Amino acid sequence: MHAITIPEAGGPEALVWAEVPDPVPGEGEVLVDVVASAVNRADLLQRQGFYNPPPGSSPYPGLECAGRVTDIGPGVSGWEIGDEVCALLAGGGYAEQVVVPAGQLLPVPEGVDLVTAAALPEVTSTVWSNVFMISHLRPGETFLVHGGSSGIGTMAIQLAKAVGAKVAVTAGTKEKLDFCGELGADILINYREQDFVEEIKKATDGAGADVILDNMGAKYLDRNVQSLATNGRLAIIGMQGGIKGELNIATLLGKRAAVTATSLRGRPAEEKAAIVAAVREHVWPLIAAGHVRPIVDRTVPMSDAAAAHRVLEESTHIGKVLLVR
């Protein structure tokens, strides 16, 4: 088969479409013929040499895919050859075929085509696990998501609105903020022109946000804590703004607030399976009913993955960028 390889770390040009050995499913695994994958910022870090795949997983980038089951390993039940699926991966999505633990497979949701389904596994798993399973966002609470026009952000807006939360977003352009508003966001904050701490306090009569989903890390740590309401929960899922920040423990104690930080890629298979099962139970019906939809900015040929990486680096996209075969 062919896959995107990274012979040497570097810029987008480091991505090379090359012939590699065919994968073979083992115990509890299935083989998926990949129709589409999606680009995540973790893939950019891997390309740059900063985020190696977990031991034993595929060396190729790609944390999600959609395609058809072509082979089934021992000990797998509930799936058949020919099933159309999408999957959460530890790596290997930028390829013609990928081996997937059966617990990380999802059926393509009703009303979604096979290519578009590749936009769903990573964002739904990330948002549901952090915002709902860990941070327990409730109806009527205020939810702030940074990077509201990203793949994660567009999904987070829709899921938070679906459970009855008030949604605030940050983004860097009017176009992006307008799109977030169309998805249902109530509070639109241009981080280039406005202070999100002040805007959140103003919009909540000084109370603050009950849950914050943050992709920036160190750069926003102190301001996020300032923005939290009493008993607020800050969920950190990215490090785009650095890895080391200063945390005011007194502020955190005074608010009885919590800070969590998680990633999906390195979790044990059983934890990923539990998250995927929760997504299938809670999110897939919302998609089938039309309350939530994947947002796709564009599709790019998989062999030209470098072009897709440049799109993410320019940060002009809204939603997901997909790689198609």
Image (cartoon, rainbow, N blue to C red):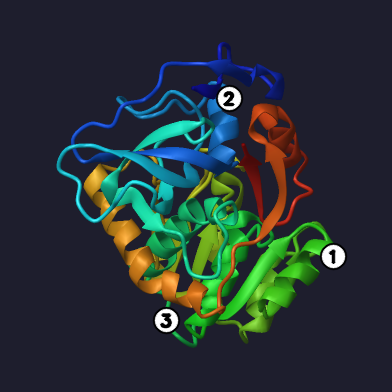
User: Which residue: 60% across, 76% down?
Assistant: 167
Q: Residue furthest left?
A: 75
Q: Nearer the viewer, mark 2 or mark 3?
A: 2
User: Disc 3 marks which residue?
Assistant: 138
Secondary structure, mark 2, is: helix
User: Disc 2 marks which residue?
Assistant: 47
* Crowd tier of the residue under label 2, counting other residues whose Cα lies within 10 Å: few below 14, some 14–19, many 20 or above: many
The answer for how far apart the CA atoms under marks 1 and 2 are is: 31 Å
Secondary structure, mark 3, is: loop
Q: Is tag 3's residue or tag 1's residue first in the polypeptide sequence?
A: 3
Along the line of sight, which residue is nearer the eye, 253 or 261? 261
Residue 322 vs residue 63: left or right? right
Residue 174 image label? 1
Q: Is residue 85 above or below residue 286?
A: above
The amino acid pointed to by label 2 is: Arg
Pointers 3 and 1 in contact (C-beta within 8 Å): no
